[in-house]
Image (cartoon, grey):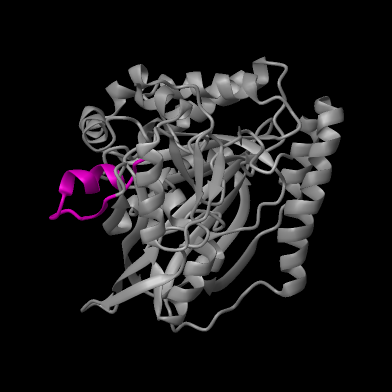
């Protein structure tokens, strides 16, 4: 690998920047951006590289935020929570540990925690729970380095248009250097995981969405079987009752990573075996129940490499959309080894949020990195578009600005802010040209 070659985690994107910089302060970051702009060079920030798209790719200067980490300040509130300001490169896993020591927790989290905070924020990372929004809804203020190198603070009351665009900005407005997030008192999660039938799960879907704090399920294609996950929030002083270490190793390391890697390698050589494998796998699952720190329950280890596409659709359209995907899978000769992940989120007002203005169901499809994903992803994308689906900004899709504009009420407002703060497209790249236009 060339010295300045960068690849994302999934291996879907490669960059060969002129220079990779790792500023150690906001002042260094500011000077770096200002210098690049004067020389007509493009600049892109990168966190952990967990986006599947080319959102961070550049042939100019690639800015690693790995040295801008940690908690900068904590301002307690009257309800036991706090406004916590963190540096942009802070990994979610490290942040969760630091918050817990302070008696705090993030309101909601996604299912992996290896991303940088700014990277996760900028691409629309979300968790699950019909009463909860994505990461961007938890942000109270931002510090952003703009294209001329200026360092600007923004919030709903100070530079509000910059805040509205920047809190889910795809790196198109500037480089986030700090973010202030609303945190709540630390809490435990009681997790109940169980195999069920797809039909029974859909029959009680409204009940689970309305009554379970964090509900999600995984459907095994070629079967009518699912794995459900119901997580209930409990006080932070409830004693933990974690999974026994042996069971945890068997379920989360041996089966979910080592065995699953082996299954996918076999499936790559003999894809016709996948339907039978899925039937056996889905029926081999056993229920489990445990209580642990919230962030430990939300996130899981993912070491099997894959490609991913995720679509946000109106929550009420989920049953028929899944039925359409099932019909396509059964009619095609394409076989799918990875479960389809279904999660939920509350409607929000974030300009480029995939849940903007509507209660949302998320359908995430995956393909092992050694297998062709294109036929499957194209089919699911076409099905999702029939119900006005919106693609996750950090996951694979083929959408363009022209067909994204109608589904986002604030799309043109976002573009206007981008034109104002980065008219020369210092932070532009091919992916942004695709999804935002020129």
Spot occupied by residue 433 in the image (x, y as percentages of width and height): 40, 24
Spot occupied by residue 377 in the image (x, y as percentages of width and height): 58, 25
User: Is 89 on the left or on the right of 372, as rendered?
Assistant: left
**Residue drawn at point x = 52 percent, y = 55 percent:** 22
Residue 92 appears in the figure: yes
Is the residue 257 above or below the residue 351 in the image?
A: below
Q: Quadrant of residue 374?
A: top right
Counting the numbered discs, the total is 0
* Image quadrant occupied by the C terminus: top left
Spot occupied by residue 78 in the image (x, y as percentages of width and height): 20, 79
Which region is colored magenta? 150-169
Q: In which quarter of the image is residue 347?
A: top left
User: Is 422 on the left or on the right of 93, as rendered?
Assistant: left
Of residues 191 and 417, the one nearer the viewer is 417
Q: Which residue lies furthest to the left in this view?
A: 157
Q: In which quarter of the image is residue 424?
A: top left
User: Is 381 on the left or on the right of 161, as rendered?
Assistant: right
Of residues 173 and 311, the one nearer the viewer is 173
**Residue drawn at point x = 56 percent, y = 55 percent:** 112
* Image quadrant occupied by the N terminus: top right
Is the residue 135 above or below the residue 92 in the image?
A: above
Spot occupied by residue 127 in the image (x, y as percentages of width and height): 45, 52
**Residue drawn at point x = 63 percent, y = 33 percent:** 12
């Amino acid at each position: 690998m060339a010295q300045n070659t960068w690849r994302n985690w999934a291996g879907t994107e490669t960059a060969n920047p002129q220079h990779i910089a790792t500023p150690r302060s906001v002042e260094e970051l500011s000077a770096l951006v200002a210098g690049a702009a004067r020389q007509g060079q493009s600049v892109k920030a990168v966190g952990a590289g967990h986006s599947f798209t080319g959102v961070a790719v550049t042939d100019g200067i690639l800015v690693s935020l790995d040295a801008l980490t940690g908690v900068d300040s904590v301002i307690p509130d009257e309800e036991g929570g706090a406004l916590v300001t963190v540096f942009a490169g802070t990994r979610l896993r490290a942040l969760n540990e630091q918050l817990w020591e302070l008696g705090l927790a993030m309101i909601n989290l996604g299912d992996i925690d290896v991303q940088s905070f700014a990277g996760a924020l900028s691409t629309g990372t979300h968790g699950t729970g019909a009463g909860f929004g994505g990461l961007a809804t938890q942000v109270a203020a931002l510090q952003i380095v703009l294209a001329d190198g200026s360092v600007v603070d923004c919030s709903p009351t100070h530079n509000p248009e910059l805040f509205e665009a920047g809190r889910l900005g795809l790196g198109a407005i500037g480089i986030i250097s700090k973010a202030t997030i609303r945190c709540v008192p630390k809490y435990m999660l009681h997790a109940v995981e169980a195999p069920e039938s797809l039909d029974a799960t859909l029959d009680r879907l409204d009940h689970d969405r309305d009554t379970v704090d964090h509900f999600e399920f995984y459907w095994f294609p070629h079967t009518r079987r699912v794995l459900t996950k119901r997580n209930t929030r409990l006080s932070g002083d409830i004693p933990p009752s974690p999974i026994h270490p042996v069971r945890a190793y068997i379920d989360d390391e041996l089966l979910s990573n080592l065995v699953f890697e082996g299954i996918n390698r076999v499936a790559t050589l003999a894809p016709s075996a996948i339907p039978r494998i899925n039937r056996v796998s889905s029926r081999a699952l056993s229920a489990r129940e445990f209580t642990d720190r919230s962030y430990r329950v939300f996130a899981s280890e993912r070491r099997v490499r894959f490609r991913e596409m995720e679509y946000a659709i109106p929550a009420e359209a989920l049953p028929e959309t899944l039925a359409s995907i099932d019909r396509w899978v059964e009619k095609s000769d394409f076989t799918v080894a990875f479960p389809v992940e279904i999660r939920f989120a509350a409607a929000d007002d974030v300009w480029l949020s995939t849940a903007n203005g509507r209660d949302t169901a998320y359908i995430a499809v995956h393909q092992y990195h050694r297998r062709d994903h294109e036929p499957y992803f194209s089919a699911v994308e076409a099905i999702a578009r029939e119900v006005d689906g919106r693609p996750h900004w950090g996951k694979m899709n083929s959408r363009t600005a022209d067909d994204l504009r109608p589904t986002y009420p604030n799309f043109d407002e976002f573009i206007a802010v981008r034109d104002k703060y980065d008219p020369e497209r210092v932070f532009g790249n091919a992916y942004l040209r695709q999804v935002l236009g020129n």
